[in-house]
Image (tube, helix red, strand yellow):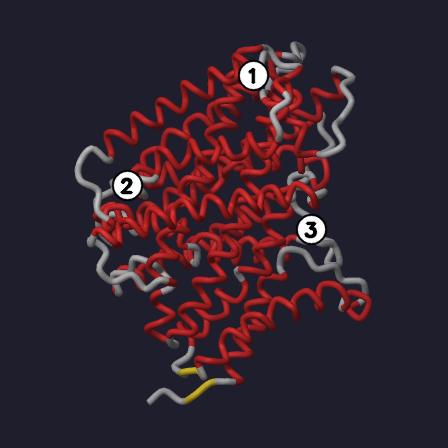
């Protein structure tokens, strides 16, 4: 696939996003519209768009490649998601709608105090910047190989171009635009996976069905029951539940979309259909992963050094050009869906939570919001460039590992607020939130020899939240 063709695909797709942005922001856009879309989004549009925002480039590229390392064990985490989404729908969403929140961390301010509020917001900002950088790094690497290397354009320039394009269509309409662009992006991501699956099946002419083909694979094991293994079912299941709670229910990015629905009932309906759809969609990505490894074996293709490079390598270098075109649409959709809503959520949180912006509609407030939007894009750019120098792991693994350290304190603070009636020494909360990830790291690094060889996995996020909860109990005050 020539770099010129890929550039044309990206250009056409970007023009389509600009068209959507034009229609969604044709009326006067206030800060309230930017932050909440005036609570007018149809629930089914939000639900479909959230699939793409939840998956992003991590699932699109990293999950199929990770099949080579951990088989279908990732589906154990996905099953756990269902429990997490149930908690979000029945516990968190009613709370957010009852308090009519713009930023969900406003709850911490009401319940625990201003220091707790800002601590939760800062940990979200850290978490989302890192997560967004991971996701965009993965997609930018693919675009670098497909386009920019051929023209000797540095990686940093290609990342900058990607962020500038995202800024251009999201800076004006905010979350109102994102709700609809995410819907388009979800469609292209799913289309790319389905087209790739059908192509590979056709390459095995003697195969009667997909089931027969998968039976030939040695990488389709879903359930693992070795207690000491990081892949043990109950570890993965509960890790998935808590990952869903913190990375969706306690994440301003994902909840900001939910809070654009007209009312609580529609938001809960959105969460129900989103969670069910995500179960089937993730299985599609795992099936694709197994087929990719079968294809490389059948065609005697050497595997790349990094599993994240498997799908891009095959799509660009070995699949027919039509499949490659759909793949590029999918990867560009993944890049934009993961970053556009993140930049909007980061802007919202910084303006509302950190700057404590009260008069949302003044000219100065709108001007500040626009500068914050530029600033968040610049920070994400710097983190991506830094990440390129140090990353050597699967990005799906990196994202969940980072989430375990950065979202854990938020989980502990919300749990304390919801399940106790105590107040806290508010000034001490930031210290507890910093200490908890440190204790979590020490637990994962040094505890296994004393636990019979037990290996910690993504369930460390539970311990991180628990350390924060215990710390808050130690500085609690009776509720007057």
Closest to the camera, between mark 2 and mark 1, is: 2
Residue 260 rendering spot, x and y as whole percentages: 27, 48
Which numbered marker is on residue 176?
Answer: 2
Q: Quadrant of residue 182?
A: top left
Q: Which image quadrant for residue 48?
A: top left
Position in image of residue 441 (x %, y %): 68, 64
Judged from this view, the residue extending furthest toward the left is 27
Helix, strand or loop status at disc 1? helix
Q: How far apart in space, not on screen, are marks 1 and 3 (Cα)?
A: 33 Å
Question: Could you tell which of marks 3 and 2 lies nearer the N-terminus?
Answer: 2
Report the mark closest to the observer, 1 or 3: 1
Q: Quadrant of the N terminus?
A: top right
- Identified at 71% across, 54% down, the residue is 230
Residue at disc 3, secondary structure: loop
Q: Quarter of the image containing the C terminus?
A: bottom left
**Could you tell me which secondary element the residue under label 2 belongs to?**
helix
Query: Residue sitting at 31 percent across and 42 percent down?
Result: 174
Q: Foreground residue, 227 or 304?
A: 304
Reading the image, the residue beneath label 3 is 231
Marks 3 and 2 sit apart, C-alpha to C-alpha, by 39 Å
């Amino acid at each position: 696939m020539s770099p010129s063709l890929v550039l044309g695909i990206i250009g056409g797709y970007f023009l389509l996003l600009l068209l959507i942005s034009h229609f969604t922001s044709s009326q006067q856009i206030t800060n309230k519209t930017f932050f909440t879309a005036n609570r007018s989004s149809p629930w089914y549009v939000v639900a479909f768009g959230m699939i793409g925002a939840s998956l992003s480039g991590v699932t699109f590229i990293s999950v199929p490649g990770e099949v080579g390392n951990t088989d279908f064990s990732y589906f154990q985490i996905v099953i756990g998601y269902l429990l997490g989404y149930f908690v979000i729908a029945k516990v968190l969403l009613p709370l957010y709608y009852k308090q009519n929140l713009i930023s969900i961390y406003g709850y911490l301010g009401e319940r625990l105090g201003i220091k707790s509020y800002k601590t939760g917001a800062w940990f979200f900002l850290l978490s989302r910047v890192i997560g967004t950088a991971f996701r965009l790094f993965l997609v930018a690497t693919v675009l670098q190989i497909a386009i920019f290397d051929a023209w000797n354009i540095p990686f940093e320039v290609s990342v900058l171009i990607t962020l500038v394009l995202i800024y251009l269509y999201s800076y004006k309409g905010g979350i109102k635009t994102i709700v609809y662009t995410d819907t388009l992006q979800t469609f292209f991501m799913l289309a790319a996976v389905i087209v790739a699956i059908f192509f590979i099946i056709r390459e095995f002419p003697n195969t009667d069905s997909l089931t027969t083909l998968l039976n030939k694979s040695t990488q389709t094991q879903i359930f693992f029951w070795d207690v000491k293994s990081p892949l043990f079912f109950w570890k993965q299941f509960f890790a998935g539940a808590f990952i869903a709670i913190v990375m969706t229910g306690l994440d301003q990015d994902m909840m900001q979309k939910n809070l654009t629905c007209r009312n609580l009932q529609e938001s809960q309906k959105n969460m129900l259909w989103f969670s069910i759809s995500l179960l089937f969609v993730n299985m599609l990505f795992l099936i694709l992963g197994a087929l990719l490894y079968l294809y490389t074996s059948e065609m005697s293709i050497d595997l790349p050094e990094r599993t994240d490079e498997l799908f891009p390598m095959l799509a660009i270098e070995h699949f027919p050009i039509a499949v490659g075109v759909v793949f590029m649409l999918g990867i560009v959709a993944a890049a934009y869906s993961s970053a556009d809503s993140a930049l909007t959520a980061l802007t919202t949180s910084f303006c509302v939570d950190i700057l404590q912006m009260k008069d949302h509609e003044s000219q100065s407030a709108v001007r500040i919001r626009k500068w914050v939007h530029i600033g968040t894009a610049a920070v994400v750019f710097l983190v991506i460039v830094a990440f390129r120098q140090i990353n050597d792991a699967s990005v799906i693994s990196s994202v969940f590992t980072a989430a375990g350290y950065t979202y854990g304190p938020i989980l502990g603070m919300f749990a304390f607020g919801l399940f106790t009636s105590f107040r806290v020494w508010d000034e001490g909360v930031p210290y507890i939130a910093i200490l908890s990830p440190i204790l979590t790291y020490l637990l994962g690094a040094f505890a296994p020899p004393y636990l019979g060889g037990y290996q910690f996995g993504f369930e460390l996020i539970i311990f991180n939240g628990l350390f924060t909860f215990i710390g808050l109990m130690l500085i609690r005050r009776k509720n007057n």
